[in-house]
Amino acid sequence: MPTEILMPALSPTMEEGTLAKWLVKEGDEVSSGDLLAEIETDKATMEFEAVDEGVIGKILVAEGTEGVAVNSPIAVLLAEGESADDIGNLSAAAPAPSAAPAPDADAAGSAPAAAAAPAPAASAAADGSRIFASPLARRIAADKGLDLSQIQGSGPRGRIVKADVIDASAAPAPAPAAQAPKAAAAATAPTGPSTDAVLRTYADRDFEEISLDGMRKTVAARLTEAKQTIPHFYLRRDIKLDALLKFRSTLNKQLEARGVKLSVNDFIIKASALALQAVPEANRVWAGDRMLQLKPSDVAVAVAIDGGLFTPVLKDAEMKSLSALSAEMKDLAARARDKKLAPHEYVGGTFAISNLGMFGIDNFDAVINPPHGAILAVGAGAKKPVVGEDGELAVATVMSVTLSVDHRVIDGALGAQLLQAIVDNLENPLGMLA
């Protein structure tokens, strides 16, 4: 029977997407790994691969179609011996794309597999539950005498694909553990006046309605979740930057021939990464009923783009040189603005940096991006009067920072130690190269 290819979930928060471009046409033969289409998610434009072989029998969703819900059919794949006449045997035609509800998935959670998700052909297990497997996988299983109900699928939604049955032996694999019944979802807390109420309030005023795209829905959902569920507290410090600015100027002169120019933000990334190593108990994330303490320093950096923001993650930042961090950050920021980041590049990390100093902001409080334990809000450096160690009044370049901390993960004294370590690194920048 023909197999429906479903709209995949290509990012952790994707509920719907835009089918930007088909890379195949009806009648084309495809194999596992072949590119089928380009999909615009709430975060990026990504390529969409096939997981099975066959012939594209029918394209159900045209290029440029917006609001295509995840898991809705977008094309039909024909297996060997099937023809376009068999498409009419499918149980249901592809539904018209419709807007999906605002996403509530965790942007920092695990990314779903970025692969094409043909609708699995179903058979029944002994207990009456459905078994999802591709036609090719079923044929190989029959040839090898395998019981599909005893094979754990690695495809989308647990679907059994070719690789699963090729690697399996005739001996039955352990049956998956029975899942506990899902708890009833708690009622969603109201987030403000209803749409109708707001429209009535401004009915006599001239306004323009602006629809929410996928990214803005995600930002709204994530920030609401963060402020409602995370017990924030805030630690503030002023950092003297004169030594860092002088050191940066010297390094940039030496690196000019290599085309490298370090920013203050590069030093902040490095200082934070080293601070997480110096205070390892603060290098943690909240995991529901436990905490995870990471060994590497994976630092996320907020990047503003049109309509939202990304937080690409610089992994193992404590191990990288300033020039390497600078080059990686420039690359991630450029691809973030073009929405070309892959999910693994903006998922994860324990700590984030949000720098608004380039906009002239003196100081601000940033919202923690769960499951991170903390985020550093960085303001602009400015000339200010300071009292020196000898009691004399002097002028120094001072930058104000605020550390927003998840109190479930990091207590006050521990947060103060982490912030002190960041301050020490930035006020004594030469030590970061030791």
Image (cartoon, rainbow, N blue to C red):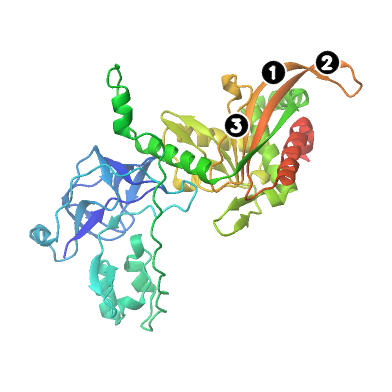
Query: CB under 8 Å between callouts 1 and 2?
Result: no
| Identity, as a three-letter code, of the amino acid under mark 2 | Ala
Circle 1 residue: 382
Of label 3 and label 1, which has the lower sequence position? 3
Q: How crowded is mark 2: few (under 14 residues within 10 Å), some or many (20 or more)?
A: few
Along the line of sight, the residue nearer the viewer: 50 or 392? 392
Q: Is residue 36 above or below residue 215?
A: below
In this view of the protein, can residue 262 be seen by the observer? Answer: no
- Mark identifier at residue 394: 2
| Identity, as a three-letter code, of the amino acid under mark 3 | Asp
- Mark identifier at residue 53: none
Along the line of sight, the residue nearer the viewer: 337 or 55? 337
Mark closer to the observer (3, 1):
3
- Secondary-structure class at tag 3: loop
Where is residue 61 shown, x and y percent of the image? 20, 45
Q: Which of the 4 image quadrants contains residue 32?
A: bottom left
Circle 3 residue: 365
| Identity, as a three-letter code, of the amino acid under mark 1 | Ala
The residue drawn where x is 75% and y is 47% is: 278
The residue drawn where x is 47% and y is 53% is: 110
